Amino acid sequence: MRTFQRRGAWAAVAGAAVIGLALTGCTGDAAEQDAADVDCGDYEDYGTFDGAEVTISGTILDLEADRLVESWSDFQTCTGISIEYQGSSEFEAQIAVLAEGGNAPDIGIVPQPGLLNRLVAGGWAIPASEPVVANIDEFWDPIWKEYATVDGTTYAAPLMASIKGYVWYSPTEFEEAGYEIPTTLDELSDLSATIAADSGHKPWCVGLESGEATGWPGTDWIEDYMLRLHGPEVYDQWVTHEIPFNDPMVAEAFDAVGEYLKNEDMVNGGIGDVSTQISEAFQTAGLPILDGECSLHHQASFYETFWNPDGGDENTVASDGSVFGFLLPPVDADSGMAVTGGGEFPVAFRDAEEVEAVRAYLSSDTWANNRVSLGGVISANKGVDPENASSELLVQSIEILQDPETTFRFDGSDLMPGAVGADSFWKGIVSWVGGEDTQTVLDTIEATWPSS
């Protein structure tokens, strides 16, 4: 673990931020523990703080919030820093307003590099300390540092991660029907056609509904196809607007995805016709696989938690279990691994030693292993032991992220300006699935790209 140079490294700022979010989820008041019961060897470099408090907010809710709080329990005991976490579904919409008013939490777990850039532009974000940057350099692929660096200054380390390009399926169905895992996009198309012709059900089940964010699951499809059809350089040009959103290469990706999402023969298995994709919640859309009513569902590694919506464990995620996933394949079977994904970045709004101590811990291999061991998530931290993950698929996901041969690109809509990535792109997907033609949708999105 990177040594934490505690004293004299940061200027303390008096007063904790007041959190004004409409909050749900759980608080971070750890159960009182006897320090003698905790091995503090992994935490001694962070120093000790008498009565210090750090507030954290983010979009992480429910069980995942409980696990997040548990992941720093020993750190609190050993350092004396009391951490309070509060989650809100409105975090992304409100954090800039709170920061502008001086009411932001000490740390905000920001899930979008585009939002991080907005917070930096407002002058509210605190640059990452040397120990945090040192951990980034040691434990992450350099591409992750780029996502939290603005004008040469790094503002946060990555936290957790996800891989966006999984196709979920039933191993039992595949074995009984003799289906093979496709190794190219053409093979995936052939498999889909075979399932449509032979199974008695439509092969794909899709849900695009997500409240005000309805449409985002469709953007994941487009991003996966942009990366696979055109490669990382064109992908980067697209998300930075070096090529326009209505470029023919973007249209090619939309039309390739449209072979599934706009095709009555392909969707919406177990749910209804093409139009039901817009009203079906993304959380429930894959569940028809369990009833044999569809065969394939495109969703990220984090979807693992949705296979048991009642909190049980009757549906196992394994290559010989109830469900499993394969990565959306490349154009050419000999191509290297290229994946899209997401993650979060703990951004600081208060310049204080205890805040940076917490951020240094969250950027360490110690924290990453603690959190991954609690289940349900992965990290791109290279210090994570993949075997700590809670399922075969998550072990595989960590190995993919740690593989130096993997080409990783962050979720494109999260990198784009909010007016596009969190608005017109989502809305465009809904209009497009609803029947609007590709060129009209792309022209509409392109017109929303900020001029500066």
Image (cartoon, rainbow, N blue to C red):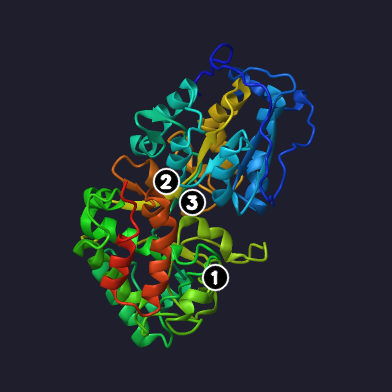
Please tell me whether mark 3 or mark 2 is closer to you in this view.
Answer: 2
**In the image, residue 389 lies at what x, y percent?**
53, 46
**In the image, residue 254 lies at what x, y percent?**
29, 68
- Give the residue pinned by disc 3: 394
Where disc 2 sits, the SS reads helix
The residue positioned 53% from the left and 65% from the top of the image is: 210
Please tell me whether mark 1 or mark 3 is closer to you in this view.
Answer: 1
The residue positioned 26% from the left and 67% from the top of the image is: 185
> Viewed as shown, does residue 63 lie left or right of 222?
right
Q: For label 1, count other residues whose C-alpha is less than 10 Å away and answer few (under 14), some (14-19) or many (20+).
A: some
Q: Amino acid at mark 1?
A: Ala
Q: Quadrant of residue 443?
A: bottom left
Q: Is residue 445 above or below residue 389?
A: below
Q: Residue 114: give its label.
A: 2
Mark 1 or mark 3: which comes first in sequence?
Answer: 1
Q: Quadrant of residue 32?
A: top right
The Cα atoms of the two marked residues, 1 and 3, are separated by 23 Å
The residue positioned 31% from the left and 74% from the top of the image is: 258
Q: Is residue 280 above or below residue 198?
A: above
Total of numbered circles in the picture? 3
- Give the residue pinned by disc 1: 281
Looking at this view, is 165 or 323 the one in front?
Answer: 165
Q: Amino acid at mark 2?
A: Gly
Looking at this view, is 10 or 365 the one in front?
Answer: 10
